[in-house]
Amino acid sequence: MVKLKPEDLASIRERMARTMSLREGKARAHVTVHLGTCGIAAGARNVMRVLMDLLEQRDAEDILLTTSGCAGLCSCEPMMTVEVKGQAPVKYIHLDEAKTVQIFESHVLAGKIVQEYALAVGSERVG
Amino acid sequence: MKPYRMHLMLCTGTGCVSNKAFRIRQVLEETLVRHHLQDEIAVVPTGCNGFCAQGPVMVVQPDGIFYQMLTERDVAELVEEHFLKGRPVRRLMFTPSGEREPVPRMSDIGFFGKQRLVALRNRGLIDPEKIEDYIARDGYAALSKILTELTPEQVIEEVKQSGLRGRGGAGFPAGRKWESRRRAPGEPKYVVCNADEGDPGAFMDRSIIESDPHSVLEGMMIGAYAIGAGRGYVYIRHEYPLAVERLDIAIRQAREFGLLGTDILGRGFDFDIEIRRGAGAFVCGETTSLVASIEGQPPEPRQRPPRTTLWGKPVNINNVETWANVPVILLRGAAWFASIGTEKSKGTKVFSLVGKVRNTGLVEVPMGITIREVVFDIGGGLADGKRFKAIQTGGPSGGCIPASLQDLPIDYEQLTEAGSMMGSGGLIVMDESDCMVDVARYFLEFLTDESCGKCTACREGVPVMYRMLAEICEGRGNEGDLELLEELSQAVIDASLCGLGKSAPNPVLSTLRYFRDEYQAHIRDRCCPACVCKALFHYLIDADICNGCGACKKSCPHEAIEGQAKSVHRILQDQCTKCGACFDVCPKDAVTKNPNPIETREPREVNELVPA
C-alpha cells in the first residue's frame, strides 16, 4: 500500500459514500422490488439483479434498493415501486430487463415518470 | 466495488459474542449463499451496539429495522421473509415492557432515542476491522486538517476551548494537561492511552475500542502532534482479548496506510503506537502505576509532584474515551463541542448501565442529563417492578447516590458534591432488594484484593474496614463501629499516596451518608431490611398461600422444611441455611424473605389453619 496523502482520504470517502449512505438510511430515491412468491416466480429477482448492476454502473450513491412482499396484484408481476424524495410513489408493472433499465434511467435518475409502464401514482391508504 | 442493497449490521461486541454472535454471522452468511443473496446483501460485523440486554442484536439497513435476542434458528426465517421478500419479522423485534406492539425501527426505541453519540459516533455503523469504513465516516479527516492547517499550539487552544475533561476519573481539563506536557523539558515525549478499565461492571473503554479503535488512534495522533511526542502506547488489559485484537488490526492498517510511521500524510510528522498489555491489576489504572508497568517495573504508584514521567521523559496520559472525543472536536470545532453539556462539564459521557434496570447496556448521553432520565427513560425503569433505591457511580472509588436525588444532573461537580464521582462511567442501578451495607462490603473486598500494598494505610486499613463490614453483615456489629469506620476512612484518605487509596473509603462513606439507618438496623436490631445478609433475615412460608405441594420440601438440601402433603409447610429456622432453594422453586410464591428478628414474625401453628 502506498502511503496516503490528504487527498487520498477524500477519494476513499467518495468511494465509500454509497456504502455509508445506505447504512445511514439517507437517499434521494427509493426503489422497492416486490419480491413475493408471485414476483419471484415471474422474474422479480432478475429485475433486482438488473437494478443492482445499474447502481454499480452509474455509481449512483444516493439510491436505496429494497424489497417488499407481494403488492397484491399478482397478475401484474414483476412489479416495482419508485419513490423519488418529495414525490408520490409510482408502481410499475409487467417488468422485464429492458423496461427496468428504461425506468431506472428515466424516472430514478432523471425524475421523469415512464407513463406507459406505470400502473398508478400513489399507494393504498394504510390504516 | 459492487454495491450491496442491504447491510446487516450484526453486533459483535463482547456481550453479543458471548451470546453466539459469531456463530449467527456464520449461519447468516451460509444462508445468504443458499438463497443466492450473497452479492446483494452484506453481513457487517460491528462493535457494541449498546443494547446488550437484548443481545445478540442486529440492525438491518437501509430499513433501520432492529432485531434482538437472535439465535441461529431464527436465521432461515429472517433471510427468507425479510431479506428476500421484504417482510420484516415482527416476533424478533423489540417490545418495550408493558406494551404489546413491537417497535420495528431502531430510532423509535426509547433506549436509543435519548442518547447522543460523540465518542461512540461510529458504533454500529462501521466494521471496526476495516480502516476504509472509519475513513468513510470522516475518519482521519481531523488529523489531515491539523497537519495541514494548524500549529500544535492552535490544536491545544482548540482542545482547551472545547472544555474537554478527562473521562477516566478525575476530570482534569485535557487541553491544560497537553499544554503543560508540551512545555515540559525533555525529549522524546510520549502519549499513552489508559485502557486499563477495571471497575466492576464497567465496559465503556472496552466497547469503544471494540467498536471504533481508529477513533482512539486518531485522537492519540492528534495529541502527539500537539505535544510533540513521537511514540505512543496503549496500555490495555489482557482480559480484553477482542479489544486487543481489533486494536492490533487497527494499528497494522494505519501503518499500512501510512497513518502511523514516518512522514504521516506527507506532512513530515513521525509517530507510532505500540500496545502494552497489562495483567489486569486494578492499580494500573492509576497513572504513576501505569507508567511503572509500561517501564517493566512492579505497578506501584509514585509520589507526585514532580509530574508523571515515562523513562524520565514527559508523558501525557489520557483515557480511551477522552482520546476518542478528540478527532470530532478538531473536525467540528470547540464551539460545537462546548455547546453540549453543562457549564463546567462539556460534551457527552459514555456509561455502562448495569444492575437492576431493564435495559442494561452501553449508553452515551449529554452531560447534565438527570439520573432519572438515564434510569427510567433509557434504562426502561427497574426490572421486576421493584422500587429504585440507589445508583452506584464511579466504581470502587465512587459512591452510592440515593433515589431521593434522582433529579440530580450528571456532571463532574454535581456527582462529587453528592459524595460520589464521575469516575470512568460505571452506573450500577440498585433496587429495594439490595443491601447497602453489603454493597459497601463488596467494594471493600474488591479493594482489599487490589491494594498494591505500598502504603500502610491502604494495605492494612482497607482490610480492617472490610472485616468490620463483614462482621456487621454477619450480625456481629458493635455500637461504635460506624464511628470507627469513619475514623479509619479518614486515616486511609490522609495517608495513602495514590488515588486508589485516597478514594477506597468512598463506598463506605457515601453509604453511611445516605443509608446510616440501614447500618444501624444491622448493628442495633440485627436486622437486614433488604433481606440480603443471611444472618439477618429469614425465610417464612405464608400459611395463607401455601397449598402444600411439597416442592419446597423436596428442594431443601437440609431437611429444614416440614409439612404433610396438601397441608401448610413450615421452615425449621434452626436448621435453615438460607440457601434460597425453596424461595426459587415455590410455584405460588408463598416463600417470603423477612427481616429479623424472627420472634415477632413466627407464624401461628399451621396445620390447624388448613381448611378441612
Image (cartoon, rainbow, N blue to C red):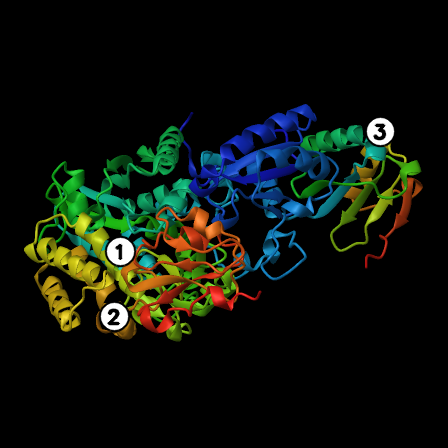
Residues packed near mark 3 inside 10 Å, few (<14), some (14 to 19) or many (20 plus) = few
- What residue lies at 31% left-to-right and 38% top-to-bottom? B239
- The three-letter amino acid code for the residue at tag 2 is Tyr
For the residues beneath circles 3 and 2, the answer to whether they share a chain is no
Tell me the residue that label 3 is attached to: A41
- Residue B434 in sight from this viewpoint: no
The x and y percentages for residue A85 are 73, 52
Tell me the residue that label 2 is attached to: B519
The x and y percentages for residue B191 are 24, 44
Real-space CA distance between mark 3 and mark 1, rounded to the nearest whole angstrom: 64 Å
Mark 1 secondary-structure assignment? helix
Residues packed near mark 2 inside 10 Å, few (<14), some (14 to 19) or many (20 plus) = many
- What residue lies at 11% left-to-right and 38% top-to-bottom? B297
Subunit bearing disc 2: B
Q: Are marks 3 and 1 in contact (CB under 8 Å)?
A: no
Q: Which mark is residue B442?
A: 1
Above or below residue A16? Residue B52 is below
Q: Are marks 2 and 1 in contact (CB under 8 Å)?
A: no
- The three-letter amino acid code for the residue at tag 1 is Tyr
